[in-house]
Image (cartoon, rainbow, N blue to C red):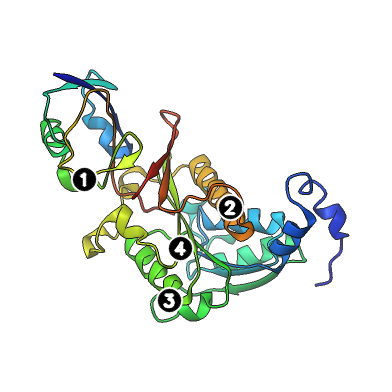
Amino acid sequence: MAEQFVKEDRYIRNFKTLSHDEQNILEKATVSIIGLGGLGGTVTEMLARTGVGNLRLVDGDIFETSNLNRQLLSEEHLIGSPKADAAKKRVIAVNSSVHVDAHHKYADESNLFDIIKGSDLVVDCLDTIDSRFVLQKSASKAGIPVVSGAIAGVSGQVTVIFPEDQGFELIYGKKAIEQSRGVETQTGNISYCALFIAALQSSECLKVLLNRGDILRNKLLIADLWSNSFEVMDLI
Amino acid sequence: MIKIDLKLFVTLSKFLPGEGESFQVDEGTSIGGLIENLSIPSAQVKLIFVNGKKVASDYRLQQGDRVGLFPPVGGG
């Protein structure tokens, strides 16, 4: 679809924080968002609005009633519909200048490399620990950095993993099958925490794409909203 | 005895003793010993941070340490 709005007008509120050159870098960038639930749906919206020009959106899931408490893209009439389709429609609705490839399929070892190759960045918005290890392996093979977020209740964490980094092993230990789920099975997930952690992920995405600011590489930002704890920990 | 600041995150918070953040332990206590003293199942502790750095469970606690214990978090 042709750009309906003049770029200068669309991004005018960006330009006192981002330079025109930086906005152009974002416009040329390709970001793959893996998982389009509480985190991924919000990251999609934020990156589209900020002006990331090419988004690959991947999730094989459909919306369920239990998603409505937190997943920005879920709407009552979309229960039973693919999350990837809703994400694509949302991006087109808020920024039709963004090129979107939506994949209504679960990302796994057999397809991840092909889906993400050629991206500048991958965003890990998955909901199991073992699938995160699979994603890191594929991204490392493809030479692409990963911005990862995870949530449980009103707590969450964000980190950035470059291809040569140890990554999730520093956070979860050696990959083990019994690690598939974290404590989110006991806590559930609350909307404002999902959106908060997604916002931090979006911020890391821009920093990596623009090579600007302090990036959470080999660091883990941990937030707990009951106690208002926000800490950046050194993983090595 | 030495004093530490102890923070237990997410599902571990239920193991926090009454003293809360300012907590006394015997000198020479390891993090592993602290976890045992608090009756926290060790498998539930995925990350241990002292003064903002990741450490192993054999780390010996020192006066004034800021200790954070974190369970595995994987939701999206």
Tell me the number on the disc at residue B76: none
Chain containing mark 2: A
Same chain assignment for discs 3 and 4: yes
Q: Amino acid at mark 2?
A: Ser
Q: Secondary structure at mark 4?
A: loop
- SS assignment at label 3: helix
Crowding at dot 1, Cα within 10 Å, few <14 / some 14-19 / many 20+, comes out as few
Pointer 3 or 2: first along the chain:
3
Instruction: Give percent across and percent down for residue A100.
Output: 66, 71
Amino acid carrying mark 4 in the image: Phe
Q: How many marks?
A: 4
Q: Which residue is mark 1?
A: B56
The residue under label 4 is A162
Disc 1 from disc 2: Cα separation: 31 Å
For the residues marked 3 and 4, what is the alpha-carbon distance in whole angstroms?
11 Å
Amino acid type, mark 3: Lys
Q: Which residue is mark 3?
A: A141
- Residue at image coords 84%, 71%: A2
Few, some or many residues within 10 Å of mark 2 (<14, 14–19, 20+): many
**Mark toward the start of the polypeptide (3 vs 4):** 3
Callouts 3 and 2 in the same chain: yes
Residue A173 point in image, percent of width and height: 26, 57
Q: Quadrant of the N terminus of chain B?
A: top left
* Same-subunit check for callouts 1 and 2: no
Q: Disc 4: which chain?
A: A
Q: Earlier in the sequence, mark 2 or mark 4?
A: 4
The reply to whether residue A211 is visible in this rendering is: yes
> In which chain is the residue bearing label 1?
B
Residue A71: x and y, percent? 54, 52
Picture disc at residue A202: 2
